[in-house]
Image (spheres, rainbow, N blue to C red):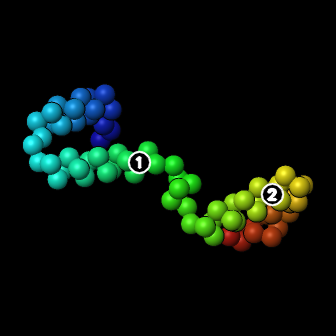
Amino acid sequence: MEINIQNAKIDLIQWLTTLEDSSLIKKIMELRKNETEDWWNTTSDAEKKSIELGISDAENGHLKSNSEAKKIYGEWL
């Protein structure tokens, strides 16, 4: 069953206007904050270092072709 997004948003807005439970409102606000937070801020230092190394390799031309990558990693793709 597919949800009509516009109707769902209207239903949520109407429901939110009737909420009196401050703990539930805080949970919703936390969810909103987490959903809009930049993924980079929640990435570990090791992952950031790996990403930066990959970008550096690409900028310096240290790349493998798609066919070479398939030969190396084909069994996992």
Q: Amino acid at mark 1?
A: Glu
- Residue 1, percent across and down? 29, 41
Task: List x then y, in percent, for residue 69.
Answer: 80, 63
Taking the image as shown, residue 55 lies to the left or right of residue 30, namely right
Q: For the point 51% across and 49% down, which residue is it?
A: 38
Q: Is residue 43 left or right of residue 11?
A: right
The mark that comes first in sequence, 2 or 1, is 1
In the rendered image, is residue 8 in sight? Answer: yes
Residue under label 2: 56
Of the numbered discs in the image, which one, if any, rests on residue 8?
none
One can see residue 67 in this view: no
Q: Which residue is mark 1?
A: 35
Q: Is residue 32 above or below residue 55?
A: above
Viewer-proximal residue among 71 and 48 = 48
Tag 1: Cα neighbours inside 10 Å, few (<14), some, or many (≥20)? few
- Of 32 and 1, nearer the camera is 32
Residue at left offset 61%, top offset 67%: 45
